[in-house]
């Protein structure tokens, strides 16, 4: 029984490390972090940005495996750490943090998708084949708006519950 648990622990750690390595490989191959640093004019802090991505991925993986540790509001409410705040207050704070997380996660995924498309030169090839000469930026903005509207409809209508 103990050998089975040890084997499962080793397999779980190994598979998690492989998945993380795959994510980091994609980010390094695409060059997303140096591109962000260049666009934000903070190129001297590229190492810090890369470390933030690594720690964010590790933290996200930890929270997805052990979600009980992410219930900070429940801990504060049970122990009345902030003077007995109401449940509705923490529910509002939780929703606000989820919205903020969703915005930043969506921005990251959108930037990653555009970086991959740019790396594969799919946008210039599409523009050349379809006859676009001007307005590529407008097309990209409308693609992003379409994805935003689609995701808002998806989540507001509860389609993810089906």
Image (spheres, rainbow, N blue to C red):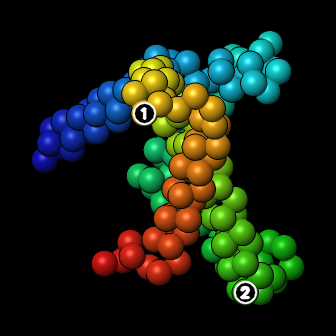
The answer to which image quadrant residue 97 occupies is: bottom right
Q: Is mark 2 on a helix, strand or loop?
A: helix
Relative to 110, is 158 above or below? below
Extreme residue in the top direction: 44
From the top left corner, tell me how far across and down residue 65 is, in percent: 41, 52
From the top left corner, tell me how far across and down residue 60 is, in percent: 52, 46
The residue sitting at 49% across, 64% down in the picture is 150
Residue toward you, 131 or 57:
131
Tag shown at residue 130: 1
Disc 2 crowd, CA 10 A, few/some/many (<14, 14-19, 20+): few
Distance between the alpha carbons at the discs numbered 2 and 1: 53 Å
Quadrant in which the C terminus is drawn: bottom left
Q: Nearer the viewer, mark 2 or mark 1?
A: 1
The residue sitting at 58% across, 28% down in the picture is 133
Can residue 64 be seen here? The reply is yes
Q: Is mark 1 on a helix, strand or loop?
A: helix
Residue toward you, 89 or 71:
89
Relative to 2, is 77 above or below? below
Tag shown at residue 106: none
Name the side, left or right, on which 48 lies relative to 28: right
Disc 1 crowd, CA 10 A, few/some/many (<14, 14-19, 20+): few
The residue sitting at 84% across, 73% down in the picture is 82
The residue sitting at 75% across, 24% down in the picture is 39
From the top left corner, tell me how far across and down residue 13 is, in percent: 33, 34
Kindly identify which residue carries mark 2: 88
From the top left corner, tell me how far across and down residue 4 is, in percent: 14, 42
Can residue 24 be seen here? The reply is no
């Amino acid at each position: 029984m103990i050998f089975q648990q040890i084997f499962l622990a080793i397999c779980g750690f190994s598979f998690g490390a492989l998945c993380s390595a795959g994510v980091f490989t994609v980010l390094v191959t695409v060059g997303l972090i140096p591109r962000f640093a260049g666009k934000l004019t903070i190129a001297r802090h590229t190492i810090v940005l890369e470390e933030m991505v690594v720690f964010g991925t590790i933290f996200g993986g930890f929270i997805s495996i052990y979600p009980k540790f992410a219930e900070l509001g429940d801990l504060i409410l049970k122990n009345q750490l902030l003077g007995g705040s109401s449940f509705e207050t923490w529910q509002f704070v939780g929703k606000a943090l989820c919205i903020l997380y969703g915005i930043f996660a969506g921005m990251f995924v959108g930037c990653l998708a555009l970086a991959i498309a740019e790396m594969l030169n799919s946008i210039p090839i599409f523009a050349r084949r379809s006859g676009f000469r001007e307005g590529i930026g407008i097309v990209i903005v409308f693609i992003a708006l379409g994805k935003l509207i689609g995701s808002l409809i998806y989540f507001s209508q509860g389609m993810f519950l089906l």
